[in-house]
Amino acid sequence: MKPEEKVLIIEANRTGMLYLRDFWNYRELFFTLAWRDIVVRYKQTIVGILWTILRPLATMVIFTVVFGKIAKLPSDAGVPYVLMVFGGMLPWQFISGTITMGSDTLVGNRGLISKVYFPRIIIPTARTIMSLVELLINAFLFVLLFIWYRYMPNWHVVFLPVFLLMAVLLALGVTYFISSLNVKYRDFQYVVPFIVQLGLYISPIGFSSAVVPEKWRLLYACNPVVGIIDGIRWCLFDSPLMMESVIAAAVISVAFFLLGIWFFRKTESEFADFI
């Protein structure tokens, strides 16, 4: 009697539970890639990790001067304009940073993708860790600003993780879409900076959503970043909150995340061919 032969099948398109199990089995690769991205990000830089703090600070100063001093747009009642701007800047930089850095991760790891099998979704997901690290660093700076202005959040702060989760889902979903498309259509690397720049101006970062005219509120709420930023400001400052924007942000974020995973899985088997 011949001994039983075992056959190992390596393939990209596996069912959801098997794919999730593969992701867990390759968790060490996930953390290795995440740590590598963090090291490479600040390797051979002059100010190193301080750049993570200087960038949002510089943007905050510019937005405060332009919108608060020159345009004289109002802040939310009782909230220092600097805190309001920084409260919008942090989630936006996390979302835009994740999308910008994650859009070319597959192309940047072409050697790894073309040689061995592993769940390719690990690559763009690992890049999110670096954005989360930067968010935590800037959150510490945000706490210092709260102390400086002697401002204390109210009990709404307990809902902050909900809106941060929405930001993570939205950022990952868009990253999955764009990174997949960028494998086959390399010109998407030029589209991403334009989208990010446009999003900076149509999102309530340097201003309060209260200044948006009533007739444009519904269209304005279709931008999921609006509900995320307004929700975070509501958690921290008790700012006015449009429920339609929160609902739209939650639905769009979850939809982008699920559709992003679906599209990524659908095109994953072709990555090695185009890379």
Image (cartoon, rainbow, N blue to C red):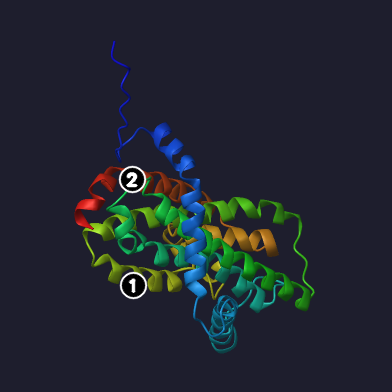
Residue 148 coordinates in the image, percent (x, y): 77, 78
Q: Secondary structure at mark 1?
A: helix
| C-alpha gap between disc 2 and disc 1 | 33 Å
Q: Amino acid at mark 1?
A: Phe
Residue 63 coordinates in the image, percent (x, y): 54, 81
Closer-to-camera residue (216/191): 191
Q: Residue at x 28, y 43 (%)?
A: 266
Q: Quadrant of the C terminus?
A: bottom left
Closer-to-camera residue (235/263): 263
Whether residue 210 can be seen here:
no
Which is more foreground, mark 2 or mark 1?
Answer: 2
Q: Is 32 placed above or below 187 here?
A: above
Q: Residue at x 63, y 52 (%)?
A: 161
Q: Quadrant of the N terminus?
A: top left
Q: Residue at x 58, y 81 (%)?
A: 54
Q: Amino acid at mark 2?
A: Tyr
Q: Secondary structure at mark 2?
A: loop
Closer-to-camera residue (2/44): 2
Q: Is 111 placed above or below 79 here?
A: above
Residue farthest toward the front in the current orientation of the protein: 1
Residue 194 has which mark?
Answer: 1
Q: Which numbered disc, 2 or 1, marks the residue that appears first in the sequence?
A: 2
Q: Residues within 10 Å of mark 1 (few under 14, many from 20)?
A: few
Q: Is residue 90 left or right of residue 263?
A: right
Residue 258 coordinates in the image, percent (x, y): 40, 44
Please identify the quarter of the rendering in which residue 84 is found.
bottom right
Residue farthest toward the left in the current orientation of the protein: 273
Q: Is 84 placed above or below 122 here?
A: below
Q: Residues within 10 Å of mark 2 (few under 14, many from 20)?
A: few
Residue that label 2 marks: 117
